């Protein structure tokens, strides 16, 4: 008996729609956030993440309205982020119905943001999102949607973030994201082994084997994917049945 | 049924409210002693820091009437921090007195496991419980916490194992509390809330 590994679908949202293919030119519409949320809730998703990929100031009210509509559909935890720069941004996100908020670029620019949020909402509500890209023998932290280098070591940043009060790490491999060739096992195992908070692996998932591998060899506590769930390439129920057969503890509805 | 949800600004109030509405109850957000005194049943939700909850109860003058209501056997459900608040104190804020209805101190989970304890875990049922009726040990519930009650207390009807064994469900007469979040625990959580409402009516 132990803690189940979590499967987390992610909705990348622009305006009022879910989009996909973040790393490719030309975003493709993938549906209505509330409808997808209801579907994943019913299919046994363990949690849902909603990210505002545009993260622009003037679109903020639209995103908050989306969080509200998504939260209404859920009987599972909801994490939301993208463009959270201040305590006030986070407060609005939580008030809209998010249980946890993710911070990324703004935390790199001003690490105290992590402590401020942790003090206000508790560490369990603060998720540090790290976009990491391999650079020879290390991983570089990328910001602004992966465009720019933060000139920081991803492992060190994860440890600093946890020290500052982050209760979870959402770790995206920029090398693997969009490739559907499997999660980044080396990156995830390295960071998961170095911090004493749960790590959500993200980027590169397609096959059930990829999930099994990131839990066993990658030491991930949770695994996140987007388009494979939206497209129906991978059903959550079948994925969990596969994992259970392969000795990964998952929550399957009784 | 009319259920008072103590509203002190905790993040999970809207989702607790929504879960109760789906079950046909009429939740009302309450933050005054008068309203609490007339409620049919009381839910104390809570996420975040123990001190924030205790201070909020004191600032709103709710401590005394909440303790009175529980002592008068008014149906009560504490969620997460709402469970921890029932004890005498917590390591998270050593100088603040809890409600002191249950004996003991809330302690941090051991650092031999990743903290917070975050995600879906199962229960070990120790004795028969009205709150857990129809729910078995195969069900998962969603936890998100770092501090917990020791499982050895007699009010513990179900425990959970994460680094150590701790109290996950307590029940003493009509006073119930859970360390996990039933409002975030899918169908199993809804069943538990339905049991609470049924037993309260």
Image (cartoon, coloured by chain):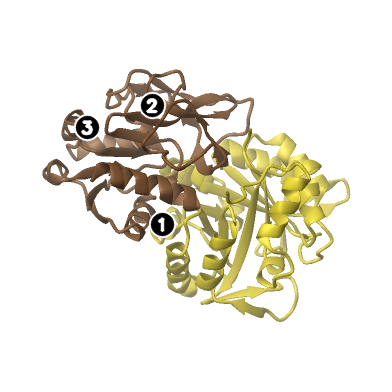
Residue A160: give its label: none
Relative to A165, say whether B26 is above or below: below
Q: Residue at x 42, y 38 (%)?
A: B132
Subunit under mark 2: B
Out of A135 and B102, give the one closest to the viewer. B102
Residue A139 placed where, x, y %? 79, 49
* Both labels 3 and 1 in a single chain: no
Chain letter, yellow in picture: A
> Is disc 3 placed on a helix, strand or loop?
helix
Residue drawn at (36%, 36%) of the image:
B130
Query: Disc 1 vs disc 2: which is toward the camera?
Result: 2
Residue under label 2, please give it.
B93
Q: Position of residue A105 (x, y in %)?
A: 61, 57
Q: Residue at x 24, y 52 (%)?
A: B29
Regarding residue A150, the answer to whether it shows in the image is no
- CA separation in Å, label 3 and label 1: 36 Å
Q: Answer whether residue B182 is visible to the viewer in this image.
A: yes
Where in the figure is residue A90, as x and y percent of width and height?
45, 56
Q: Label 2: how many residues lie within 10 Å, few (<14), some (14-19) or many (20+)?
A: some
Q: Residue B70 bears which disc, if any?
A: 3
Residue A117 percent coordinates (x, y): 47, 47
Mark 2 lies on a secondary structure that is loop
Q: CA distance from mark 2 to mark 3?
A: 23 Å
Q: Respond whether the residues carrying marks 2 and 3 are from the same subunit.
A: yes
Horizontal arrangement in the rendering, residue B16 relative to residue A138 (left or right): left
* Foreground tag (2 vs 3): 3
Labels 2 and 3: the sequence-earlier one: 3
Q: Chain B is shown in which shade? A: brown
Q: Give the residue at mark 1.
A: A88
Instruction: Write down the quadrant of residue A217 in the picture.
Output: top right
């Amino acid at each position: 008996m132990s803690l189940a590994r979590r499967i987390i679908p992610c909705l990348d949202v622009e305006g009022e729609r879910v989009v996909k293919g973040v790393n490719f030119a030309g975003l493709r519409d993938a549906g209505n956030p509330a409808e997808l949320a209801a579907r994943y809730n019913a299919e046994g998703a363990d949690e849902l993440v909603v990210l505002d990929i545009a993260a622009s100031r003037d679109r903020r009210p639209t995103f908050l309205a989306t969080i509200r509509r998504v939260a209404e559909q859920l009987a599972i935890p909801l994490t939301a982020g993208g463009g959270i720069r201040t305590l006030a941004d986070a407060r609005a996100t939580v008030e809209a119905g998010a249980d946890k908020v993710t911070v990324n670029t703004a935390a790199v620019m001003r690490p105290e943001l992590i402590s401020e949020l942790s003090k206000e909402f508790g560490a369990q509500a603060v998720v540090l999102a790290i976009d990491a890209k391999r650079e020879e023998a290390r991983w570089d932290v990328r910001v602004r949607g992966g465009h720019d280098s933060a000139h920081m070591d991803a492992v060190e940043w994860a440890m600093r973030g946890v020290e500052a009060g982050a209760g979870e790490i959402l770790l995206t491999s920029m090398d693997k994201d969009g490739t559907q060739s499997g999660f980044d096992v080396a990156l995830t195992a390295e960071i998961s082994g170095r911090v004493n908070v749960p790590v959500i692996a993200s980027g590169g998932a397609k096959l059930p084997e990829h999930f099994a591998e990131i839990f066993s060899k990658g030491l991930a506590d949770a695994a996140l994917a987007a388009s494979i769930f939206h497209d129906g390439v991978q059903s959550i129920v079948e994925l969990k049945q596969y994992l259970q057969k392969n000795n990964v503890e998952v929550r399957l509805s009784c | 049924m009319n259920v008072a949800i103590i509203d002190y600004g905790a993040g999970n109030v809207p989702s607790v409210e929504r879960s109760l509405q789906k079950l046909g109850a009429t939740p009302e957000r309450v933050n005054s002693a008068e309203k609490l005194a007339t409620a049919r049943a009381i839910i104390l939700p809570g996420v975040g820091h123990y001190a924030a909850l205790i201070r909020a109860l004191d600032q709103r003058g709710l401590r005394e009437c909440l303790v009175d209501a529980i002592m008068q056997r008014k149906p009560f459900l504490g969620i997460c921090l709402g469970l921890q608040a029932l004890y005498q104190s917590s390591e998270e804020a050593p100088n603040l007195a809890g409600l002191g209805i249950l004996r003991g101190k809330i302690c941090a989970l051991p650092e031999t496991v990743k903290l917070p304890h975050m995600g879906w875990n199962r229960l070990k049922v120790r004795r028969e419980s009205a709150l857990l009726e129809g729910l078995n040990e195969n069900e998962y519930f969603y936890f998100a916490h770092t501090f917990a009650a020791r499982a050895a207390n007699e009010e513990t009807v179900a425990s959970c194992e994460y680094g150590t064994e701790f109290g996950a469900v307590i029940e003493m007469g009509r006073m119930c509390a859970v360390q996990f979040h039933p409002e975030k625990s899918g169908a199993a959580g809804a069943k538990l809330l339905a049991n609470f409402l049924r037993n309260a009516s």
